[in-house]
Image (cartoon, rainbow, N blue to C red):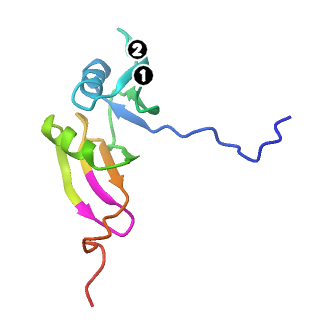
Amino acid sequence: MNTSTRQIECTIPILPVRDLARCVAFYTGPLGFKLDWGGEAGSRICSVSKDGCAIMLSQRDTIAEPAWAWIGCEDESLFETWRSNGVKVRQAPRNCTWAYEMKFEDLDGNILWLGTEPRRDEPFEDQIPS
């Protein structure tokens, strides 16, 4: 019997993709993830990770709408790395009360929403000035 009060080990976003091999190359290339498992010829699912945090990619015949994944970052260095690697920017960096955030798109339009702690030395864009 488990005496721990913790019941959830982890959560992992599963993003729909049209071409698994192409997306594995994108995630392990410009995004800098590593392939953990799956992704071989004929596979329809895999796991990629960066700094011990995983995202699963699941090949689908059709994608009704893109998925979103929040990626909490220690600092904003990944913002510039991905931008300089040519990853499509969905939203430029903005400072909000919940995070300093930036959004990117993968090859299938899934949103990778990166965020760090909010910048305390800049105004928050989600607040209306009085």
Q: Residue furthest toward the front? A: 121
Asked whether 95 falls inside the magenta stretch, the response is yes
Q: Residue furthest toward the top? A: 41
Query: From the viewer's perspective, is the residue at label 1 or at label 2 nearer?
Result: 1
Instruction: State the separation of the CA atoms marked 1 and 2.
Output: 8 Å
Residue 92 image label? none
Residue linked to disc 2: 43
Q: Nearer the viewer, residue 98 or 67?
A: 98
Residue occupying the point 78% across, 43% down: 4
Q: Nearer the viewer, residue 24 or 65?
A: 24
Q: Which portion, as a residue range, is magenta? A: 94-102
Asked whether 32 falls inside the magenta stretch, the response is no
**Would you identify the image quadrant in which residue 93 lies?**
bottom left
**Would you identify the image quadrant in which residue 122 lies?**
bottom left
The x and y percentages for residue 52 are 46, 31
Residue linked to disc 1: 46
- Disc 1 element: strand
